[in-house]
Image (cartoon, helix red, strand yellow):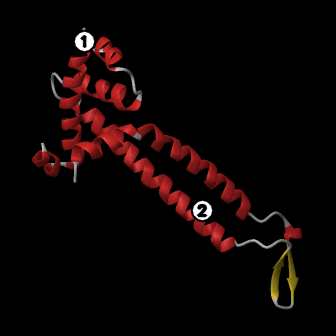
Amino acid sequence: MDCIREAENYLRYYRDLKKSVEHADTMIARLTWQTVPKGAGVAQMEATGIHAGRPVNTLNQFYQLQKWQEMRENTLVEVARVDKELDSICEDLGCERYKDVLVMWYVEKLSKEEIAEAIGYSHRQSAYEIRNKAIKKFAVTLFGIEALRAI
């Protein structure tokens, strides 16, 4: 496993992960609304049991609802993990810029010149150097010894 690339992917898709939680919330609300009975007129009793006014595959909707809830929860766990690890790389002295550089680089997608200026350096090479150190540290916090061996 290429731990550096995996760590970069977590950061590159961070915003998309958060958007996917919003989308999951929408789908969960929609499916919840669709599966709730719409009053007494919806079902009619027949000799063979209950007959719905319109065909609804309720079991399928419950299954979809469960899957959307699972996806949402799993995504929230990963977003929280990234947040935690980003915060943890800042705990060391001298590393306070690491989180900022990673967020500006991968999440906000700022230019290298903008990043260098934001962290107080005059040229973009400094942004690359700090990013390289920061992404390695981030990868180790995410993947542990496997990332350390790869570095």
Residue 6 visible, this orientation = yes
Residue 6 picture location, percent across and down: 29, 46
Question: Image point 30% across, 29% down: which residue?
Answer: 102
* Residue on which disc 2 sits: 65
Above-or-below relation of 4 to 134: below
Local crowd size for mark 1, using a 10 Å CA cut-off: few (<14), some (14–19), many (≥20): some
The residue at the far left in this view is 149
- SS under mark 2: helix
* Residue on which disc 1 sits: 123
Above-or-below relation of 56 to 111: below
Assess whether mark 2 and mark 1 are in contact (beta carbons under 8 angstroms).
Answer: no
Local crowd size for mark 2, using a 10 Å CA cut-off: few (<14), some (14–19), many (≥20): many
Nearer to me, 16 or 74: 16
Residue 38, quarter of picture:
bottom right
**Residues under labels 1 and 2: Cα distance?**
50 Å
Question: Image point 58% across, 47% down: which residue?
Answer: 23
The residue at the far bottom in this view is 47
